[in-house]
Amino acid sequence: MPESQPPESHQQQPSGNDGGAAAGPTALVLGGARLADGRTVDVRLSGGRIEAVGTTGSLVPGPRLDLGGYLLLPAPAEPHAHCDTALTADIAGPVPHTAEDVQRRTTEAALLHLGHGATAVRTHVRIGGVHGLRSLEAVLEARHSLRGLIDLGAVAVPRVLTGAAGADGLAMLRDAVGMGASVVGGCPDLDPDPTGHAEAVLDLAARHGCAVDLHTDGDDPARLARLAAMAGGLRPGVTIGPCGGLARLP
């Protein structure tokens, strides 16, 4: 879709040169904005939506912010964050994982993303081990407090899901979905049975209608091909990352 055409649900009037149309009382014109295709346009905002896009100087006069040719893009999204452990590089000793600490870090990290324009963040939260589901619970509390400011999606990430050791991980992953984790995660590379791990995550996601986001280095083309085949009908909702190993492939 051309950058000058907002999504249909965001259109209150046809976009284009409609400078004669009456602007709303809260309208703001972003003047001299450069679009990704190189055009310089004016954009009128009203009620939190894009109301019109027209050639420079064509829109109804009113409150105006001159962008002076700065690039205007849709708000970016951050697909792979770890807000619960963010901002801890300078901490001497173990990172504190009390509910208050995790919620504070998550909130601060999310607001830093928002301050740079990102209105949606997907944060990956480790579950299991000594912390159980406590970190996830704190992240979900932060998500609730940030509602209306930023869309914070939580990915529940277990470690082992296969064999005798994986039973607890599976149970905890099911509990995480029940708590409100919006995405089912996993780390196939860290499981003794990577294929079984991915199968467990995909099966749980299919049962609960969740999206999937798997941590993998992505350095094995055969494993990536198997994962794509296993995803089947879920593929539109399956994400893998950070895939640093792709840089080492031909």
Image (tube, grey):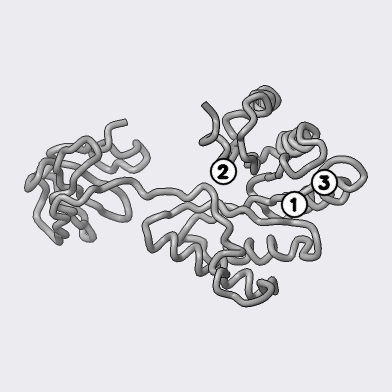
Few, some or many residues within 10 Å of mark 3 (<14, 14–19, 20+): many
| Residue type at numbered disc 2 | Pro
Q: Which residue is drawn at 68% across and 44% down?
A: 184
**Relative to 114, is 73 above or below?**
above
Residue underneath mark 1: 178
Residue underneath mark 3: 170
Few, some or many residues within 10 Å of mark 1 (<14, 14–19, 20+): few
Q: Is residue 122 left or right of residue 66?
A: right
Q: Which residue is drawn at 47% across and 60% down?
A: 148
Where disc 2 sits, the SS reads strand
The furthest residue to the left: 57
| Residue type at numbered disc 1 | Gly
Indicate which disc residue 242 carries: 2
Q: Is residue 164 left or right of residue 232?
A: right
User: 188 or 100: which is nearer to us?
Assistant: 188
Nearer the observer: mark 2 or 1; the answer is 2
User: 112 or 178: which is nearer to us?
Assistant: 112
Q: Which residue is drawn at 44% across and 65% down?
A: 112
CA–CA distance in space, label 2 to label 3:
23 Å
Where does residue 242 sit, x and y in percent of width and height? 56, 43
Which quadrant would the N terminus be assigned to in this image?
top left
Where does residue 24 sit, x and y in percent of width and height? 21, 55
